[in-house]
Amino acid sequence: MRKIAITTVAIAGVALMALSGCSARNSTSGSDASGFKAGSIIGVALPDKTSENWVLAGKLFTDDLTKAGFKPDVLYAPSANTASEQANQISTMNTKGAKVLIIGAFDGKQLGSQVKDAHTNGAKVIAYDRIIEDSKDVDYYVAYNNEKVGELQGQALLDGMKSRFPDAKTYNIELFSGASTDPNAAVFFDGAMKILQPKIDDGTLKVVSGQTKIDQTQTTGWLAANAQTRMDTLLAGNYSGSTVLNGVLSPNDTLARAIITSIQNAGKDKPVMPVVTGQDSEAASIPLIMSGVQYSTINKDTTKLVEQAVSMVKQLAAGKKATTNSPATDNGSVKVPTYYLPPQLVTKDNAAESYKNNPTLEALTK
Ligand code: BGC
């Protein structure tokens, strides 16, 4: 029994060394303060499943970390408004002795004491997709470039309206943002407003409701039902009679589909469907994009983001610094070393090309 256990650990150690390309001393020495050994627990704390990318990330982390010789402990925050429950999950990961915490925060501001404890235990903290705010105990940030996502959304809204309403000189629009607990929501919104604000200022764009501030546009919990209710209210109050709605800035696909439903229920999809943006390349949105109902989405391949996070873990296990490729991200307390992947805008014109490495999504473009 004992012999088998030792052999298993040895094999796992060799596998880890091969994958991380590191020296025997670093990868196998549990006492090396700056590295850790095969079989170590890696905690992965993800928010609730507000979009498909989070669902996929959990599965990929489990598979990829296991393949790399680690012991993944992957947990989701149970449901909306559960910052404290996610904090408890992370505390338990600390107690179990996780060597790295990979955290997609439910609330970017509520995890200060958990990541501090992780550092006290000698563990490393990687913020995944969402930055952890106002804490010096964050070692790395890995994400798609969120500001760029917002800029692409803002530009897509403008370009889409130009092509769908070729005779219009000005455009009526409404703006949506994500959950105020998610730091990305403001980054997406600010990125989009970099493109849209000058056009609001020069009169090309009119936000008919007048709701242009982020706190007027947010969607509690990133929940579709909340976006649909707000869109219903905006349409009823501002678009009665023949007032045309030309476009809506939607921060992701889940909310885009809710906004589209509201537009269709109000009959504002005729004679021309307004331009609605999105993000995440969710399977349910691809057919809508191909048929012109949703204008755009963003391709942020979750497989690649998880791979990047796992490659960071391998480097840390080897006692090395993780690779970064971008200016550090200011989290309000420190500048966090950052690895950004590039997001890609997708419309029906480039969907097949953009998803050519993803057979499931590519099939939906046919
Ligand atoms: C992610 C988006 C996602 C949203 C809601 C954000 O933090 O970056 O991809 O749509 O959360 O789940």
Image: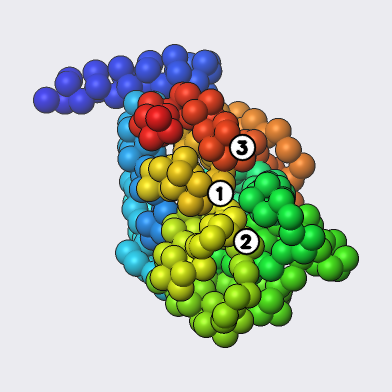
Q: Residue at x 40, y 30 (%)?
A: 366
Q: Residue at x 84, y 68 (%)?
A: 203
Q: Say whether disc 1 or disc 3 marks the residue closer to the N-terminus.
A: 1
Q: CA distance from mark 2 to mark 1?
A: 10 Å
Find residue 201 and report its horizontal and vertical position in percent: 86, 68
State the image coordinates of residue 57 (x, y, percent, origin top left). Answer: 40, 43
- Is residue 109 visible to the viewer in this orientation of the structure? no
Residue farthest toward the bottom in the current orientation of the protein: 237
Residues at circles 2 and 3 in contact by the CB criterion of under 8 Å: no
Beta carbon of the mark 3 residue lies under 8 A of ligand 1? no
User: Does label 2 or label 3 sit earlier along the sequence?
Assistant: 2
Q: Nearer the viewer, mark 1 or mark 3?
A: 1
x 51%, y 74%: residue: 231
Identify the residue position indicated by label 2 in the image. 247
Residue 223 quadrant? bottom left
The local secondary structure at tag 2 comes to strand
* The furthest residue to the right: 202
From the image, tell me which residue sits under label 3: 344
Quadrant of the snapshot with the N terminus: top left
User: Where does the image place residue 25, in percent across and percent down from the top left?
Assistant: 51, 20
- C-beta proximity under 8 Å, tags 2 and 1: yes
- Specify few, some or many for label 2: CA neighbours under 10 Å numbering under 14, 14-19, or 20 or more: many
Q: Disc 2 residue type?
A: Gly
Mark 1 highlights which residue?
295
Q: Left or right of 157: which side holds 254?
A: left
User: Tag 1 or tag 2, which sits nearer the N-term?
Assistant: 2
